[in-house]
Every structure is written in structure tokens, then in C-alpha cells.
Image (cartoon, rainbow, N blue to C red):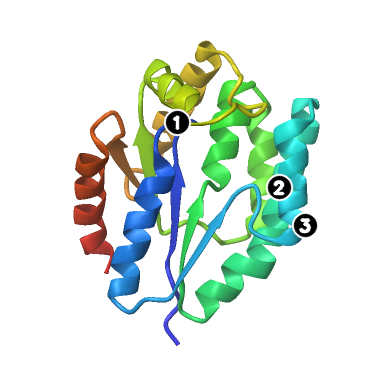
Amino acid sequence: MTRGRFITFEGIDGAGKSTQIDRLQALLVERGIEVVRTREPGGTPLAEKIRALLLADDMCTMSETLLFFAARAEHIARVIEPALARGAWVLSDRFTDATYAYQVGGKAFDGAAVEALERMVQGQLNPDRTVLFDIEPLVAAERLAKARAADRFERESVDFFRRVREAYLDRARRNPERFFIVDAAQSPEDVSRALLTEAQGWL
């Protein structure tokens, strides 16, 4: 059986990822492809409990990073790898690039430690494609304020999100064959058009 494809979606909070994941999922389903939609942290009952802790409880950055990888280990073992093995496409709202962006870029956590955890937890698993929804942090913050109450991460400063954004863009520069950058400040329709046009090349 042909192995499925692993597509991840990244960007700072307020970039509008969820709407666009919906639209890509609809396109794939129309093509007869099995799609597993998931998120990080989360995706399994245990990982969702870890998510609740991460979003609500203040903690040091080391504890935070270790919990992200604990949730990721469950996610990979119980959702991502089984789905890929049976030929499904996995669409994940965030993966390890988010840890580099938020913990390493935003909070200056040790990048070498994250690399070691990545090797231990993921092995050879990496996304086939990553869509980065890029947006200026002030614009994202305005959108977010209209959408919902902020969680612990979303309450961080604009300077924090500028560092996160730069870390994401640096990841994209280092991995140009994997990343597709979308200008998320465009209208949702224009973002969808860019994404779905790019996705035609993945099929």
C-alpha cells in the first residue's frame, strides 16, 4: 500500500489556519483521499489532557517543551503513523516547527535540546509539506481579539510574536523544499486560492 502524506500547517496565532485546513480537507475528500485531521498539542485523549495543561497553567519553558514532546510522541504513535501506513493523508494544525518557533524563537530555549528531542521522538518522521501562514503580529492580534478569549500563549507580547514569526521564516529559509509560505494578510478567498493551487502539485 502507498504510504500517505503528512501535511502540517504553521503560523502565529490569528493567522487563519483553521479555515484553510477545512478547504484543503474538502479538496482531498473530493478526490477520494482519506484524510485524518488533527492538531498539536493534542490529537489523542492523553495529548488533549496535556494540551489543557499547556494552554492554562504557567510553567517553566523546559517543562513546557518536554510536555509538547510527550504529547507529540503519543500523537505520532497512535494517530499519525497508523494513518500514514494505511495510505491516509494527515493534516496537522502545528507540529515540531511550532516548538522551534515558540519555545526556541519566542522564549530562547536551547535549540540543540529541541533537536535531540526531535530525533528521539520522531525518528525519521518529518512533514512532506508545511504551509506557513505568514502575517504581521499586530494584524494577527487584532483578528484574534475579535475571535475568542486568549489562552496563555496568545496573551504573550507583540515582541514575542515577532520573534516567533522570524523563527518560522528562518525555518522556511532553511527548508525551502518543504515549506510553502502564504501571505495570510490577504482575504481568506485569496489565501485559499494560493493554497489550493499549490496543493494541486501534491496530488
Q: Position of residue 8 (x, y in %)?
A: 45, 52
Q: Secondary structure at mark 3?
A: helix
Count of marks, rendered view: 3
Residue sitting at x 57%, y 35% = 100
10 Å neighbourhood of mark 3: few (<14), some, or many (≥20)? few
Image point (25%, 47%), residue name:
192
* Residue 146 tag number: none
Q: Residue at x 29, y 65 (%)?
A: 27
Which part of the image, by quadrant, shows the C terminus? bottom left
**2 or 1: mark nearer the eye:** 1
Which sits earlier in the primary sequence, circle 2 or circle 3?
3
List x then y, in percent, for residue 36.
Answer: 50, 67
- The residue carrying mark 3 is 46
Horizontal side, residue 69 vs residue 194: left or right: right
Kind of residue at disc 3: Leu
Instruction: Give the amino acid type for the residue marked by disc 1 in the picture.
Output: Gly
What residue type is disc 2 on?
A: Phe
144 and 69: which is toward the camera: 144
Q: Is residue 45 above or below residue 55?
A: below
* Image location (x, y in percent) of residue 71: 72, 51
Q: Which residue is mark 1?
A: 14
Labels 2 & 1 near each other (Cβ < 8 A): no
Mark 2 and mark 3: Cα distance apart in space? 12 Å
Residue for badge 2: 69
Q: Earlier in the sequence, mark 2 or mark 1?
A: 1
In space, the residues marked 3 and 1 are separated at their CA atoms by 26 Å
Which of the two discs, 3 and 1, labels the residue nearer the N terminus? 1
Which residue is at 67% across, 53% downward? 72
The front one of 23 and 86 is: 23
Q: CA distance from mark 2 to mark 1?
A: 23 Å
Q: Is residue 75 above or below residue 1?
A: above
